[in-house]
Amino acid sequence: MMKSIFSGLIFTLLLSVNAKGQGINFFHGKWSEALEKAKSEDKLIFVDAYASWCGPCKRMSSEVFTHPKSGEFYNSSFVCLKIDMEKPENSDFADKYPVMSYPTLMFIDPAGKIVLKDIGYRDVEPFVELGKKALNKVTNATEYAQQYADGNRDPQFLFRYVSALNRTGSPSLKITNDYLNTQSDLSTDFNQRFIFEGATEADSRVFDLLIKNRARIEALVGKEPVDAKIETACKNTVKKAISFKDEKLLGEAIQKMKSANPDRGGQFELESKRTYFAAVKDVKNYLKAVKAYQKALVKNSAAKQHELVIDMLESFPNDPSVLRTAAQYEEKAAENGGLPEYYLTLAGIYKQQGDKEKAKNTAQQAIKAIGEKDNGMRARIEYFLNSLG
């Protein structure tokens, strides 16, 4: 029942969630600078070739590019760029890479060669899959796997193989460990870079080596990449904890993040516990994690309160205790923020709780809160009111 209430609203409601910038971080430099950045980072460039009048382009910008899943994958895998193909200042790019329809999604290598091109709107999951398809075209992972099986243990080859596996999210830890175990001196620049590339999970010897050699590795690759690598490795261990339903592994990821990056450790703990207990369907501990998160990070922010409620509704759409807490939070969001989507979400919660009259009154408040540009909100509210019968 809840799914039918919210399925048509979730993407719209996530607009306010993504104000935090959890989605794709687009590069704002020139095309030539994007090529240089891609070359230095050994990445493909993802280009959203769009037009300002294009409806599907606007939907992807507001619903797909801002989604945390898109951001998590694309930020680590590509240099990302948005180009308005009809602006005069982009004419050189448009001449070199002409498009016939919008949006056109392009994946271009650092030499400027198109690896993959796709036309039209894609939802989050297909969009991530498209990126993986592009990476698979350039990683040579299959070829590398065969060379490895045939006995190739050249260090430069192994580094390229591990890098290729990491770009596609494939396991690489065994290959990294097998190589490092052959080395009597891990202090060379090459081996330090290998440790950095291979540290994909916090619950590993390679991660411990990264922390031990952190100052030296930061001097080679920079502080920000090391910080990002540490957080990604800790997140990967949280994912592993979810896969095995292992709370001790969750604790290890949190502890290592706190130790490696104290400034981010507290927030990482709150976010990770919320994610873990939602995934393993532990309602009691999920609510504890939610309340701790709300108290420490959300406070009186209407947008963050609404974001938290959406997470709760997606995680446990039918649980009465979660619905009660979600209603309390969304009531505060509506009171403090006054946006129509806050009232509409609250109305949906009331309907799920069986209070149709309260749902109707709250939906009518949503109509009153609509501004001059409602972006289809009025139609969604009217659809909801009709669903009340």
Image (tube, rainbow, N blue to C red):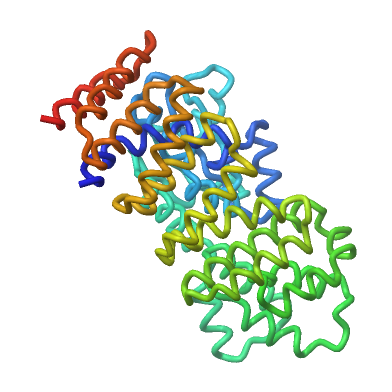
Q: Position of residue 362 (x, y in %)?
A: 30, 24
Q: Is residue 95 left or right of residue 205?
A: left
The residue lying toward the viewer, choosing from 215 and 157, is 215
Which one is nearer the viewer's eye here, 240 or 30? 240
Q: Quadrant of the C terminus?
A: top left
* Residue ID at (19%, 27%): 383
Residue shown at 37% from the left, 49% from the top: 314
Question: Residue at the spot x=67%, y=71% of the render?
Answer: 202
Q: Residue 253, relative to residue 79: is it above or below?
A: below
Number of on-image labels? 0
Where is residue 78? Give x, y as percent.
Answer: 58, 50
Q: Percent position (x, y) of residue 323?
A: 36, 45
In the foreground, 106 or 310: 310
Residue sitting at x 70%, y 55%: 228
Task: Please determine whether, in this image, residue 342 is positioned above or below residue 328.
Answer: above
Question: Residue 165 vs residue 325: left or right?
Answer: right
The residue sitting at the top extreme is: 372
Residue 195 percent across, percent down from the top left: 76, 72
Examine the rendered structure and indicate whether residue 149 appears above or below residue 85.
below
Q: Is residue 292 visible?
A: yes
> Could one spot residue 101 in this view of the protein?
no
